[in-house]
Structure formats: C-alpha cells, structure tokens
Image: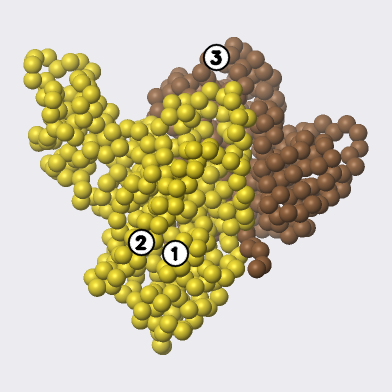
Chain colours: A yellow, B brown
Amino acid sequence: MTRTHPHNCWYALATSEEVGREPLGRRALGTGLVLFRTDDGVAVALEDRCAHRPYPLSRGWLDGDTIVSGYSGFVYDASGMCVRVPTQDEVPPGARVRAFPVHNDGVFVWAWLGDPALAPLRPPAALPWLRDPGWVTIGDVWETAADLALLHENFADITHVAVVDPFIAPPVLRDSPPPLEVEVTETTVSFSRTYTAAPVAGWHAELAGLDPESRHVQRERGAFVSPGLWVDSWDVAVDQGPGAPRELTFRFTHAVTPVAPGRTRHAWRVSRNFAGGEQASNILLPIFAGYYRRVQSILETMQGVLDAEGPRREVNVSADAAALQVRKIIRNMVADETGTPVRRGTRPRPGRRAGVATVPAD
Amino acid sequence: MTATKTIVREHEADLVVQLAESVADGVVALTLADPSGDPLPPWTPGAHIDLMLDGDLIRQYSLCGSPGRPESWRIGVLRAPDSRGGSERVHAALTSGTKVRVRGPRNHFPLVSSPRYRFVAGGIGITPILPMIAEAHASGAEWTLLYGGRERPSMAFTDELAGYGDRVTIAPQDETGMLDLGSVLATPEPDTLVYCCGPEGLLAAVEKLCEGWPPGALHLERFAAKPQEQAPGAESGFELVLERSGLTLHVPPERTVLQVIRDAGVAVLASCMEGVCGTCETEVVDGDVDHRDSILNEDERASNEVMMVCVSRCRSARLTLDL
C-alpha cells in the first residue's frame, strides 16, 4: 500500500495537560509513541516499544528522567538510549529506542515522526489565541475512522454545513455563496469569502447579544497550515455605538493526526473573542460537538464506501478549489519525502501508475 | 442559482528590504521581512519567489536562506547587464529599508529525499542549492557540490560553503578551466539524485551527460526559457473543453490556451507567460498535449497528467482540461 501521509510534519499527539509524570501511549502514522515529562517538565516522545521484547514502554513507569520497561526492566533515558538492564552490568551497546523531536506550545504536544534532522528546518505554526486571555476556548478530541484526506477536504469547503446541520449553519450559507478567494503558497492554502450583510443564526445572535433580525457582514476564512493543522474563522462585523466597528470572531482550530490509514485523531477547539464565561461555553459545547459528531459520522461513512468500492473519479465544482490545492500539496510532500516520482496531477487515475515502486504504508 | 465565482491566486505581500549586501562582484543578497514582524509563509529548499517590480516587471529568485528562520527570506541577485532590466532595477532600487511586492513562494525544484546527491551549480545558480545542501547535510546524506563560475570574486556564498570542507569543489574558470562535469556525472550512480542550476550552457551539458542516468535522477532549474524547436507543420487550432465549467471553446493558432480560458471568464493562475514558472499548471483530462514549457521532465510529459497552459498546446483535435 502506498504511503499517503507526509511524515515530515508536526502532528499533535496530546494536550499539554495529558503529558505528565505518567507514561502516555499514543499512535501516529502507524507508530506507537510513549509521551512523558522529565523532572524539569520537558516533554519527551519515544518509540513505544522496548528494544528487548515487543512490550510497550507506556505499560512501564518513570524513574526520574528515565522510563522503565514493565516487562524487561530495561531503562531508557530521554534520548531513547538504554542506560541500564537488570540482568547484567554491561548495557547492550547500541540498545535504544527512537526519540522524536517534540514541540510543546502549552496547548498541544506536537511530535515530528519524519527525518528528525529536518524538524528544526520546519518551524511549527503558533496558535496564540488558544492561550490569549482575550479568547475563550472549548473543544474535544476523538478518533475518526476516516483517512486524513477526507478530514482535510471537509475543512476546505464549509458549504456542506447548511446541508449537514441546518441549526448551526449561518443563514447566509443557504444562498448561493459569494466569490471564493483562494490563496496558495508552496505548502499552504488559505481561502476567504465575504457575505453581504445578513442575520446570523439564532443561537449565535442570542450568545452575542445581537438582535436576531439585525444584519451583519460576515466573513469566512480558512487555512490549511500543514497536513496536521487547519485554522478557520467566522467573523461577524458589529457596530456597537460610537466605537469603531469590531468583529465578533469564532476561530476553529483542528489538529489532525493520522493514526493509521483510515484512522485520524481529531482535536478540535472553538475559540471566541466575545461572550466569555462558563455559561456561554456550556451552551456552545453541545452545539459544536453535535455538528462535529455529524461530520465524523459522515466521513466514516465515506471511508466505508471507499473501502468497499475503491476511489472513483469525482465531480468537482469550483467551490472545491481549496481542497484541490490541498491535495496537490500533500501529494507533492509525500512524493518529495519518499523519493517516489512526483505525481503532479490531483485526479485519481486508477491503474495508471501500476509500474511505480511503492514505499511501505503508514 | 448563479455559479460560484472562484479566484485562485498566489500569496502576495509587501515586504521590506532589511538588508542589501554585496556578496560577490555583481551579486547582491537581499534579506526580506514582513514589516509587521509576522513570520513569512513556509517554504522548502528549491523554492522561489517573484519580485514584482515597477512597470509590470516580474523576476524570479530562489530563496537561499534557511526555511528554519521564517522571520525573513534571503535572495541573491546577479546584475545581468544584458537582461531585460529586472536585475538592474533590483540592484539600483532595492536598498535597505525599501519595500517590494513579493509573490509566492512556489517550488518546482523540490529536494526529493535520497541517500546521495550530486549538486552542480553555475554562477548565481548556487542560490537554490545552498538550502538544499544544508538540508542534505543535516539529514546525513552523502553529497558533493561542484560550483563553477567565471572567476573567484564573482562567485557568491563561497564563505558559507567553506565549512563543508572537501565535499565542495569551487572551480573558477580562470583558475581551473572548464567545469569538469565528467568527473561527477560520467558514471551513473545508484540511489543518487543530480541537482543542477545555472546558465543554459551548463544545464544542456549536464542534461547530455545524464542521459544514461535512471529516469528521474536529474533535477534542473532554468532561469530562462529552454530554446524550443519549431513544431513541424502549421497548426490549425484545436477544440478546448473545460470539463468542470461545461464550456467548449476554440483555440486558434495565434492565441494561447490560457488566453482562450481567460476570455471565457474562467479563473486560472498564471505568472511568467513563458513556461518557466509552473504557476499555470493545469490538469489534463484528455488530449495529446504538445508540451512547450521548461518545467516538466520527460516522465511528467509522457504521463500527460498536467500541462502549462501559458505556452503548451495540443496535437490532437480536442484538448479537455479539468477546469
């Protein structure tokens, strides 16, 4: 099976709070990882498999800055080097487990599963709104039984929201959308649409303290930051008296991590710069969780169709422009890092590249 | 319901020249940054940007700093007196503190992962190679660089290359004569990629020497359009089907595919209009494409998956594109 996910990318493996002084086992790109913090609080990610027998280190325990296998008793330091074995004085030379570069931004612990030498050359994106006191954030995390690509294509076009969840959808999504502006760079895609003044959804007006009949210019923005990260926004222009017009913004952060082919970990956060407070959060959480659960179910159903029938040539519309650019970037990233010939096209062409050597699956 | 209008364009920004320094005879290195201090878009080795100079003058320059430092980009610009004036303009106008409109980055010269590389650079063609070497070196790949130039003072960034020791061969023509390409390329090596950037003469020589290498081993970047042989026989035009738009158009011999697409009101990205930048890469559904660009390699042309609509045409009666 051909590898479809870039490995040279920062992927979120856990929240910052989840990683502590107990070993935490996680999977990404088909690899088991064990996460923990040293005494100094530095997050560490090692391969979750003792070099002695195939037993996960996450089933063991921490001893200072080292982790001890719960079966062999082999002891590994934070660089993955085996530093002690219980049955002999001599540590088997070269015994070690892989250590992965880690980035901890205070919200998520990100790991780099590709070439470790390249990690410092690919700085992770900053997500300051997740820690800024001016923003209030809710969220959840779960695994979706669908491939990473399906999640990306879902984020790249929100015109489905009006179909999938009419309650949550801004009323403007029910009409023919205004022009979509897509901006590309070598490795990123962003898009925006500005809607003419219209009411916001009922729950949104109530939360923001707006007259449900009042009309507001609204702007949708989305950005494929990397194969592991999407950031979207929904801005509502409000004119509240003498001050300059300001924007009430929902910002959506999606940290997506391929667990294995057809399985993706999805950590989502919904941040807002208005209507702070726990009561508002308690109202919003089920609204957004409900929508994202519907999306999860739909993507899992799509994956089921793909698994049963294979890919087929799809009908794309111009609203898919961002998704097509994302596909292209991911495909080029995989081709460059695996050394397989670059497939420049994004169209599925089953069978055409049958002679091309493939690399091990994720 | 009216159709959604979609505009796809490349990232553009007004950047400030933080530093303009002379790094060799006739070569200036510019450090560009966002005036707000925000990080610039990410890139990988081999990427280039457009400098959008006054009077619709657009020039492309490889990024030659480090992708690990998103706070700024660096480019190296050779003053080419016989050019159409772009590099002269850059040297004269882009001093420290001035602003310049920039588009990109994009990358048609990506560094494909490999255990071994043979880098060959001629003159200012060293610029995309610099970050490639840094990355190959960090990854522990085996690599060598053959870097030719007219004379030592005209060769930029030799100081930065000094740290790599004898992996780098600096070969100024007035000291060592013609670049000894045969020493590096005469015998194809397994699991090895060749990356070459420089003037057309060097590229042509490297292309010829690499004919015996496995397909896909050679990666080239051209800064000027490859000389094209005239297509045999006069073309009488062809039918153009834009599948997603549901349009059937006619491309007469005197108009490009891109012009006909744009006249029909369909958005497609384009930049250089001479088949060198790859911005207008468009997916082909059907048709025998007459590739006239300087970007696609032979494998990619043969696959018939994409074409550059600014210059490439069609040999068959009908061309169908995914637009």
Q: Provide the chain ID for the residue under circle 3.
A: B
**Badges 2 and 3, same chain:** no
In the image, B195: left or right of A109?
right
The residue where tag 2 is placed is A290
Locate residue B295 relative to residue B137 in the image: left or right: right
Q: Height in image: A141 above or below B129?
A: below
- Gap between marks 1 and 2, in whole Å? 9 Å
B144 above or below B13? above
Look at 73% across and 34% down and name the residue there.
B226
Q: Residue A165 at x, y = what percent?
A: 44, 64
Amino acid residing under circle 1: Asp
- Please tell me which residue lies in front, B102 or A177: A177
Q: Residue at x 49, y 73 (%)?
A: A171
- For label 3, the residue is B189
Q: What's the mark number on residue A165?
A: 1
Say what amino acid the circle numbered 2 marks: Gly
Residue at image coords 20%, 21%: A53
Circle 3 Cα neighbour tier, 10 Å, few/some/many (<14 / 14–19 / ≥20): some
Q: Secondary structure at mark 1?
A: loop
Q: Circle 1 marks a residue in which chain?
A: A
